[in-house]
Amino acid sequence: MKTPTRFAVLGTGHWARTCHGATLAAHPDVELVGFWGRDVGRARAAAAEHGGEGFDDLDVLLDRVDAVTVALPPDVQATVALRAAAAGRHLLLDKPIALDLAAADELVAGVRRSGVASVVYLTYRFQPEITDWLDELAARARRDGPWEGAVARWAGSIDVPGNPYGASMWRRERGGLWDTGPHALSVLLPLLGPVRRVAAGRGVRDALVVALEHESAAGSSMSLTLTAPAGAGGSFATVWGPGGRHDLPRFTQTPQQGFARAVDRLREAAGTGRPDELDVSANRHTVAVLAAAEEFAARAPGERGVEVS
């Protein structure tokens, strides 16, 4: 297996430039070949800022690289990532990997067919304080017994002036469930295991409270929003069981430092042929949970929870 060294960014927005592009440009072991986006002018501007070229032809870019990082709306990401995988390019994707289960399944199948490596960047799962905490709690569960429940709140404030994602149409259309939900699940799933059934209730604006019944018999809940008022944003999680009650710690490093670890993990997976624990297959379940919650929220009052496919 060959370890990828030539990377390109698919996307030209705030996250593509300030996280993907900036991290790849500073990484000592990779080359930033350039950027591609639907607006070639923005791609060229991003390249002028961080290095490489701005491409207007995706196929030309794919011929020049070993791997791509994708910072596009999830529905666009799923389609473009399939194209990159078919060309044999390794994938470092953002969450969620898609906005519906059919697209997620198609992407998983395409990655398997091509044999490329994939990693999904979940901010909290690439921060040492969080991974150490999860490892400690896994050890406690083995010693004292499984965790029995958890509660998580993830709240963004997209309407606050100056928020860099204020113009993100997919976030405004799909709300906190799809943008903040993957973050909450990235913590809950390692602690409590896969989800069997969900129910959901709506709050003000885009707020959604999701009740999760896990296959382990544990129960958890997520309170999710992207439209919290100024000063009301932030995230927390608490888990409890025979090992006591424990709160999710804060992380101190930057998203860019975490993204550099994701780049290293992708390079390792590609070089060794061993799938990463946060590859597209693992993230398919997250899409299934979010889709089930969305389906339940659209139902009439009084109906039972939605089974997770």
Image (cartoon, grey):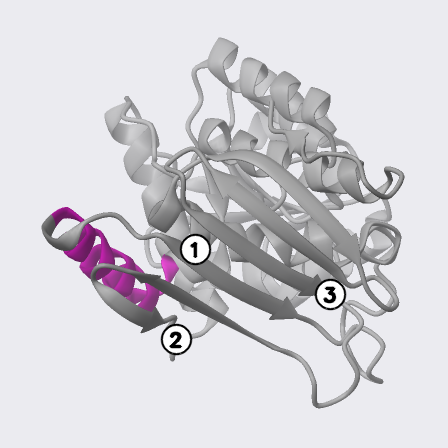
**The C terminus lies in quadrant:** top right
Give percent across and percent down for residue 85. 56, 22
CA gap, disc 2 and disc 1 = 13 Å
Q: Indicate the secondary structure of the residue bearing disc 2.
A: loop
Task: Write down the residue under mark 1.
Answer: 187
Q: Main secondary structure of the magenta part?
A: helix
Mark 2 vs mark 3: which is more N-terminal? 3
Instruction: Choose between 141 and 88: the one closer to the eye.
Output: 141
Instruction: Choose between 292 and 55: the one closer to the eye.
Output: 292
Q: Residues within 10 Å of mark 3 (few under 14, many from 20)?
A: many
Give percent across and percent down for residue 25. 49, 60
Q: Residue at x 61, y 67 (%)?
A: 154
Mark 2 vs mark 1: which is more N-terminal? 1
Q: Is residue 93 above or below residue 136?
A: above
Give percent across and percent down for residue 46. 70, 60
Q: Indicate the secondary structure of the residue bearing disc 3.
A: strand
Instruction: Determine if residue 232 is in view.
Output: yes
Check residue 129 for magenta coloring: yes
Write down the region rendered in magenta. Answer: 126-142
**The N terminus lies in quadrant:** top left
Task: Write down the residue under mark 3.
Answer: 225
Does the CB distance between marks 2 and 1 fall below 8 Å?
no
Determine whether, in the image, residue 30 is placed left or right of residue 163: left
| Type of the residue with mark 2 | Phe
